[in-house]
């Protein structure tokens, strides 16, 4: 992603994604050691390279002695590779098998890919399908125009929820009680004053979804980026995802996004609803 971040910098927001964690003290079935193992794996971010035990301890908040045992165990299981010369660890290809099992069994992704690709190529935009990952959205499928070089999302890319079209679409798709839960976490993360300003924009986007099926976001997450987003909600509301269509401002104008691509995206998501479990 080569564009400049907007007011809420991506790195500052996405590096701290532990706000929605279960309270182990009240759950007798919760296995803390297993949870910590997954936190170690989550600490490795695209483009950040290998990490040592001290870095992993700082990122996760887990004591270094515990981190050392966890990285040793994960190495023995084949999920981490120990780079002895550097004294660091990196994820191995074995982790891909876990993610591939999810993607290959996701029926909605299989059905949505071709129309998403058609839209991306026809209008020289990016079209992405994303699911919630704590306070962020993670893309499970992305179709990019071949000519789009300034902003290219990929499968596995994570973006902030409250100031992106796909994130606001997700917030529009969930129930009010759950939405308030996220609002409280955003306020804790951003501070009351900053969240108050951002909340107005989120509420406006939700109203847009209710009125016309999609929301429009410009110049917030990345400077010069325009996008529309719409929720994808299962029949029983057990699953809520978001779909976005966007590009830099010099590629697509607002009139095209709101007049043509937004309605088309909303129609696609309505047609995909029966495929979502």
Image (cartoon, rainbow, N blue to C red):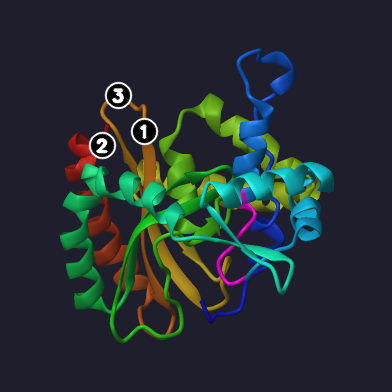
Q: Is residue 259 magenta?
A: no
Q: Residues within 10 Å of mark 2 (few under 14, many from 20)?
A: some
Q: Which residue is mark 3?
A: 236
Q: Which residue is mark 2?
A: 276
Q: Which mark is residue 239?
A: 1
Please provide percent x and percent y for residue 9. 67, 66
Q: CA distance from mark 3 to mark 1?
A: 8 Å
Which residue sits at x=59%, y=52%?
75
Please provide percent x and percent y for residue 193. 79, 49
Quarter of the rendering occupied by the C terminus? top left
Of pointers 2 and 3, the one earlier in the residue sequence: 3
Mark 2–mark 3 CB contact (< 8 Å): no
Q: Is residue 224 above or below residue 228?
A: below
Query: Which element type, helix, strand or loop, lies under badge 1?
Result: loop
Q: Residues within 10 Å of mark 3 (few under 14, many from 20)?
A: few
Q: Nearer the viewer, residue 86 or 165?
A: 86
Which residue sits at x=34%, y=27%?
237
Q: In the picture, residue 106 is in which quadrant?
A: top left
Which residue sits at x=45%, y=84%?
150
Q: Nearer the viewer, residue 35 or 191?
A: 35
Magenta range: 41-48
Mark 2–mark 1 CB contact (< 8 Å): yes
Query: Which element type, helix, strand or loop, lies under badge 3?
Result: loop
Say which of marks 2 and 3 sits in front: 2
Inspect this view and state whether residue 9 appears. Answer: no
Inspect this view and state whether residue 221 appears. Answer: yes
């Amino acid at each position: 992603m080569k564009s400049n971040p907007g007011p809420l910098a991506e790195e500052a927001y996405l590096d701290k994604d532990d706000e929605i964690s279960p309270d182990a003290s009240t759950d007798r079935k919760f296995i803390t050691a297993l949870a910590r193992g997954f936190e170690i794996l989550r600490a490795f971010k695209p483009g950040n390279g290998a990490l040592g035990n001290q870095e992993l301890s700082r990122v996760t908040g887990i004591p270094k002695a515990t981190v050392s045992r966890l990285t040793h165990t994960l190495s023995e299981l084949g999920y981490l590779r120990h780079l002895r010369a550097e004294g660091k660890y990196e994820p191995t290809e074995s982790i891909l098998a876990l993610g591939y099992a999810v993607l290959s069994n996701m029926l909605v992704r299989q059905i949505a890919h071709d129309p998403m690709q058609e839209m991306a190529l026809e209008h020289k935009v990016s079209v992405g399908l994303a699911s919630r990952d704590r306070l962020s959205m993670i893309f499970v499928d992305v179709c990019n125009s071949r000519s789009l070089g300034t902003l290219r999302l990929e499968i596995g890319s994570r973006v902030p929820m409250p100031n992106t079209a796909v994130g606001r679409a997700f917030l529009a798709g969930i129930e009010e009680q759950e939405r308030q839960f996220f609002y409280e976490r955003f306020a804790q993360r951003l501070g009351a004053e900053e969240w108050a300003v951002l909340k107005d924009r989120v509420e406006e986007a939700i109203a847009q979804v209710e009125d016309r099926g999609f929301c429009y976001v410009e110049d917030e997450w990345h400077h010069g980026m325009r996008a529309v987003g719409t929720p994808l909600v299962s029949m029983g509301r057990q699953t809520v995802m978001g779909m976005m269509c966007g590009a830099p401002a010099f590629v697509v104008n607002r009139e095209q996004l709101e007049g043509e691509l937004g309605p088309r995206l909303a129609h696609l998501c309505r047609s995909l609803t029966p495929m979502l479990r």
